[in-house]
Image (cartoon, coloured by chain):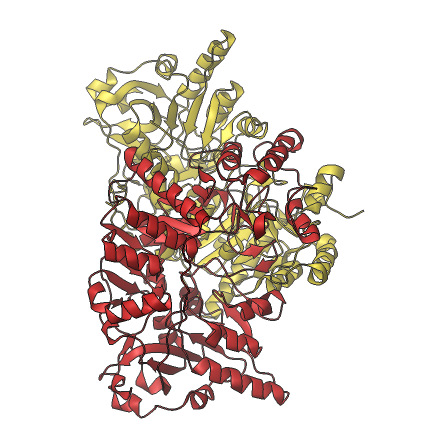
Chain colours: A yellow, B red
């Protein structure tokens, strides 16, 4: 395994994860690698969790502030949360143990646009970053670092941190080298320049990270797979959502608003996103591009079939099977994949310029096109908004996708008023459920309400929504966005009290 | 007056406003000039309103869909609304008669990010644009058009419309010629290029509009002032808000996060924005820049004093006195002002690159940093979000400003949950009221709540807010963003029922 470490000075710093974790001090801020379960450190976080537990057993305080790229895994967020080792977490999490800490009020969580975190840490109000813990796939003879399966914010953490701990993971394919595009020109204003990407396939950076070897206090060798993002076969609802989308693409091509190659696709993470790619593979569309955060199983299939000619991303989120397939054939993707820093993969400048078709999941939408991506019943954090805001605000067309009901129909995902807003009515162009697609572009709030009820609501809730809207049209103080404020959040309250949003 | 029309072919098309208005047909979409009460057509809209009234008197339907740059005046929005002549209005309005139509449900209103409207009309889902009605300050011999006191979306309307009506307003200073910067490279994707502005003073376009003379069906001569945006002397609350801001700037300079020249300022419209400029003029800050939508009286003073070295904008909003002063000394501002298309003045690419300090007013904010800029009690449209979203989402620091109470204290502008969200918790860095400044950067929702109550809430409402938050901390389903959903909008409901948000 040590063949991956080609710099003698850094090779001399190889030690155990426990020894490395001893460099991390209580109360400090740590920037770790990791994005959608890929490229996170596999050993040091667990060793740190043990160190924290031992400190707690001795009655000592030991918690850190933790920045990453996005979500990691049970070996990292899970272990650290289980040890109650995280005081503040940014910018994204999907781990259930960490989620429980956040929703119990035990860990503070700052849910942040993924393109924004690095610049805000550079800006300085989070305070100094004490340690960076970054997984890489190799260390070059000159000390430069070959990234692993996600790039995320690693460049910034390596530059900002006082000390650096590297994990060199020999499970990652050596052939990843050359796929990355690390951009080093993101200065703080007033020193910023245009980001020179005019096509998703444009490369603007270098293939590796620089780090001051003197800052590296430890190198840990690992051989461990990324999180298995289990691939579920598409259910009927996901397929229906995907079919509505592909039909809409055809319609827009027929109208002359998209050309045959569409525009670069951004696709969120999960089952529905995989189904969208599967439907595209079945469709006549060919030679498309993706400018997105994450490559999932479905996108890998679309690259294989030629449906996608290439994809720009910052990370992978693959099933075990797809990861094995990818790792043993990385060279086949050499001209088809670019793995960028997340500031660039999600950059609003590029999203607007390239004219992205942005497809993201959501928890709920309301009659007027406001979208809640994050908060269960308005108060509990599910995961976070991730990159959805980076993409939706500046997209050529922004799509938000969800099945029309959840919890076996006890929750309507179309509600009178969302219980939390992550995407405002101004940023939401198209809503899609398995029931249909609501094209809200150019519609006023009341026009949107009628389309959303007709096209997207589940039949079980359609009348209940119409009844609310009709009564709001009569009883609302103003008729721009009609609401009965005493009742607008009552569906959520009813769910909390009775276990269903259905009226008795 | 005819000396302003130097193109013989277009001179031959001079006619009365009534004759010109006859070209506008019922049910069509019209793009008019106008932004914050400057550069809107002064004669044709009133003539059109008369034409509409006459049609209505004959029992005929006659309404148009109306796009502009932003707000206009009683001579335009007021006259057309009074005639019930507008079916659909975008993207912004401040006229009280039009507002009443919108809130009565009689005119559909699509409240739109000001940098987004042109591209969405180009995209095509609003349907074809039948007529453009654009005020200019002169027509060159070669037929090119010298813009007047706002540029807004005029370039797009002139290019998109089937037919064009020009108003040549000789009240506008001839010296405006040369101040404009009209950018013609905003293609639809995939043909977009980087927008080459790296400093607010960079010019990237031309000083005039092109129009196909064959499309021009009428030229109307006017001599009429822009809307008088009456300057009110700053009240104590506005001064206090401005002082908190300037103190924060000093603090950030001391922390090394801003340099002595700060970063380019964006400043909303109104009394508070004028007060901010006045406080900056009194401060030690010098040689700053503005990258903003609108130049108001306060910004003109700041240019005069050298507090600002230059300002980039898309429009003016001046008092009668300031407009006279400006018009008679335009040449003094030749190197200090650039008037751009609103796609560029508000471009997210440039806002992020330049690192704007974005200061915008709001109606209310909630404990968790969500901001309502538009909806009175959640249902009635006040004006619209304007450019606030273009600037806030991508700003280096985003500030939202309001007095802590309205309606003589009957309304608290800090509430448990805002009744409508225009700016999400993810986009709001700093809240400022006359009570103080809440720096929310890097804080979790619960941490924000404590700072917002302590720093921004009016003393009369502070305990009521603390009581809500404390009870939510005990009774909320989740503790990431604690809420009591049955009560979170009760302050607004109480105001509607009793005339005050105060608890009995």
Residue A130 to residue B131: above or below: above
**Quarter in which the N terminus of chain B is drawn:** bottom left
A223 up-or-down from A411: above or below: above
Q: Does B285 sit above or below residue B74?
A: above
Name the side, left or right, on which A492 lies relative to B283: right
Locate residue B225: give its quadrant. Answer: bottom left
Relative placement, left or right, of A435 versus A397 is: right
- In the displayed structure image, the side of residue A489 where residue A136 appears, left or right: left
Q: Nearest the camera: B102 or A391? A: B102
Q: Position of residue A359 (x, y in %)?
A: 49, 51
Query: Residue at coordinates 39% horizontally, 25% vertically from top-left?
Result: A41
Q: Is residue B195 visible?
A: no
Q: Is residue B429 left or right of residue A272?
A: left
Hey, which quadrant is residue A18 in on the image? top left
Q: Position of residue B176 (x, y in %)?
A: 25, 71
- Nearest the camera: A348 or B303? B303
Q: Is residue B138 above or below residue A145?
A: below
Q: Residue at x 59, y 27 (%)?
A: A104
Residue B442 locus on image (x, y percent):
43, 34
């Amino acid at each position: 395994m040590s063949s991956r470490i080609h710099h003698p000075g850094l090779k001399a710093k190889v030690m155990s994860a426990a020894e490395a974790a001893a460099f991390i001090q209580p109360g400090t801020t740590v920037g770790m690698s990791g994005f959608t379960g890929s490229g996170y450190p596999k050993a040091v976080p667990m060793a740190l969790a043990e160190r924290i537990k031992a400190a707690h057993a001795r009655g000592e305080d030991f918690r850190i502030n933790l920045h990453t790229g996005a979500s990691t895994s049970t070996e990292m967020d899970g272990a650290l949360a289980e040890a109650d080792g995280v005081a503040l977490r940014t910018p994204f999490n999907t781990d259930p143990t960490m989620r429980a800490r956040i929703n119990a009020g035990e860990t503070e969580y700052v849910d942040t646009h993924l393109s924004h975190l690095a610049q805000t840490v550079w800006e300085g109000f989070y305070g100094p970053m004490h340690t960076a813990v970054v997984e890489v796939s190799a260390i070059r003879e000159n000390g430069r670092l070959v990234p692993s399966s996600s790039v995320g914010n690693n460049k910034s953490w390596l530059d900002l941190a006082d000390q650096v701990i590297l994990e060199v993971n020999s499970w990652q394919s050596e052939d990843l080298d050359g796929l990355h595009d690390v951009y080093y020109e993101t200065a703080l204003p007033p020193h910023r320049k245009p980001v020179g990407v005019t096509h998703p396939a444009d490369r603007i950076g270098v293939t590796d990270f620089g780090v001051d070897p003197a800052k590296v206090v430890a190198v840990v060798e690992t051989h461990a797979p990324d999180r298995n993002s289990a691939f579920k076969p598409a259910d009927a609802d996901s397929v229906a959502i995907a079919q509505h989308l592909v039909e809409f693409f055809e319609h827009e091509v027929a109208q002359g608003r998209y050309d045959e190659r569409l525009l670069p696709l951004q696709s969120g993470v999960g089952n529905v996103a995989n189904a969208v790619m599967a439907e595209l593979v079945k469709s006549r569309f060919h030679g498309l591009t993706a400018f997105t955060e994450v490559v999932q199983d479905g996108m890998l299939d679309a690259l294989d079939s030629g449906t996608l000619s290439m994809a720009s991303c910052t990370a992978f989120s693959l099933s075990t099977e797809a990861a094995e397939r990818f790792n043993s054939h990385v060279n086949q993707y050499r001209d088809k994949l670019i793995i960028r820093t997340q500031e660039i993969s999600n950059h609003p400048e590029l999203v607007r310029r390239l004219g992205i078709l942005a497809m993201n999941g959501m928890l709920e939408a309301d009659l007027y096109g406001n979208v809640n991506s994050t908060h269960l019943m308005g108060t509990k954090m599910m995961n976070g908004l991730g990159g959805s805001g980076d993409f939706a605000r500046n997209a050529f067309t922004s799509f938000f996708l969800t099945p029309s009901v959840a919890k076996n129909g006890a929750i309507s995902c179309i509600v009178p008023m969302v219980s939390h807003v992550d995407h405002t009515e101004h940023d939401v162009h198209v809503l899609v459920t398995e029931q249909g697609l609501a094209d809200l572009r150019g519609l006023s709030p009341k026009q949107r309400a009628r389309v959303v009820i007709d096209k997207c609501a589940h039949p079980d809730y359609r009348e209940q929504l119409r009844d609310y809207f009709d009564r709001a049209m009569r009883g609302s103080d103003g008729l721009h966005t009609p609401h009965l404020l005493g009742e607008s959040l009552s569906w959520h309250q009813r769910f909390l009290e009775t276990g269903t949003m259905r009226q008795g």
